[in-house]
Amino acid sequence: MFKDLLMFLPRFRGVYLVGGAVRDARMERMPKDFDIAVSGDAESFAEAAARELNCRAVKLGKPQGVIYRLRAREQIYEITPLWGPDIETDLFRRDFTVNAMAWSLEEERLIDPAGGLRDIREKRIGRVTEQCFTQDPLRLLRAYRFAGQLGFAIDFETEAAIEAQPELISMTAGERIREELLKLLEVPESAPQIRGMEKSGLLFEIFPELLPLKSCGQNRHHDFNALEHTLQAFEKFEEMLAGEASHIFGPTGEFDPGQKEKGGSGIRLLKLSVLLHDIGKPGSKSIDQKGVIHFYGHERTGAEAFSKIGLRLKLSRKEIRFVESLIENHLRPLHLFNADQKGMLTGKGVARFFMRCRELTPYLLLHSLADMEGKNRSPQPRETEFRKFIRELAHHYHAEFKPRSRSAPLITGHDLIRIFGLSPSPDFKRLLSMVEEARYGGRIETREDAIRMVQGALKKSAEE
């Protein structure tokens, strides 16, 4: 397999394919990127490789850490000088054994001084040296990311080393933590790794806001403390991605591709919102005279707390707002459900919910369902009813609200000026929202209906 992957590269002495590409090839997975270490003149090799591949070598980095990047045949090649005098020294400075292998292009042989091939066979992640995490504390998080991506377990010694020094992660820049964390959340089954991070303490070093949830008891609707509920909800959410998401995200079962433009990858950020949705609970907890626990306003408090987390992780403004909105609104579907159970839910209430949340709606519905199903040790009848209700809401959103929202409004601000002689004011938004709400709720259909509705509202205001 190596020969096929590297047949286009020039044959210089002392050139090695290293790291993840070697690991992936040994696991019979197609590598995405190729890291190449050169014992000698890396620039000359990069230029020769660029000629062979009919592309350009781009020089990146600083003098002490130069990288030559080539893009060709839908692949990325990153060429660097060796770390140290020989390939073995270079490999022993790497993070984990499965990433510390090399393939000699000249001799066509595998070089594996740290036992990476053995650990691939045994499906484990092990550090190369005892200095692994002090050399680069981001590796604490990378251990869980690789374990999740490869389906491996972190070995005992490496796990013990993480547990002994999770606070090292605080020495790492927020944007580096963000990139590793989002890569981990891309893994379909990242919940076991989140659990592992909770056990080692690394989760609380990255998100100290989660630690108070550990001692935050809850009310009679919950079997778990706030932290265990959060982890249960996260697990339920990942389970739903393989099934329930198809009911909530429309006929195709796909996440809204437009969400990428609005705030990054929706799936990763949605997972992040589930993980952090209750961080406002400890600060909002109260107990009434009957001894009943309440968390009034915890969703707003949590959204405010997340804004600081987002800045710490150097998330974009759109990404922060996306997660904030999910946390701030995560109880709304439950409020609608409670109203429905009491026979008090109206079309107006549903329309108002859709208008407020718009394209956020499917994400919010799935989030809310995971939140509900993470409350108890065993399934409850209320959960079954809630799931049915969420499906109905999703159907209503896709079949009725979205088609109507794409059509032109029945009445505009210009109409309010021209037909009713009004001057622009805050009342414009109230009147236009009233009309659209009635339209989405199915109470009016035509422009004439909208005009009559505004006439009635203006007449009532004048009488008051």
Image: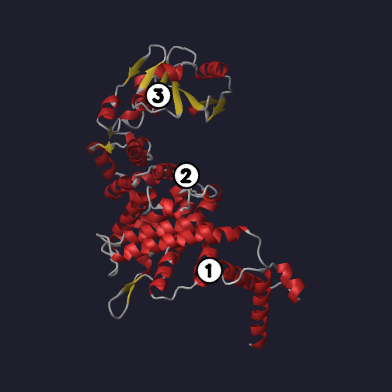
Q: Identify the image quadrant of the C terminus.
A: bottom right
Q: Position of residue 299 (x, y in %)?
A: 42, 65
Label at residue 153: none
Of 86 and 203, the residue lying toward us: 203
Alpha-carbon distance for marks 3 and 1? 56 Å
Q: Which residue matches tag 3?
A: 18
> Looking at the picture, which amino acid does disc 1 mark?
Arg
Whichever of callouts 2 and 3 sits on the residue coming sooner in the sequence is 3
Circle 1 — which element?
helix
> Looking at the picture, which amino acid does disc 3 mark?
Val
Q: Position of residue 169 (x, y in %)?
A: 37, 44
Circle 3 — which element?
strand
Label at residue 175: 2
Of 231 and 95, the residue lying toward us: 231
Extreme bottom residue here? 463
The image shows a total of numbered marks equal to 3
| Above or below for 317 versus 93 | below
Q: Quadrant of residue 420?
A: bottom right
> Looking at the picture, which amino acid does disc 2 mark?
Glu
Q: Quadrant of residue 5?
A: top left
Circle 2 — which element?
helix
Question: Callout 3: 10 Å neighbours few (<14), some, many (20+)?
Answer: many
Whichever of callouts 1 and 2 sits on the residue coming sooner in the sequence is 2
Q: Are marks 1 and 2 in contact (CB under 8 Å)?
A: no
Q: Which residue matches tag 1?
A: 352
**211 left or right of 451 in image:** left
Q: Position of residue 302 (x, y in %)?
A: 42, 62
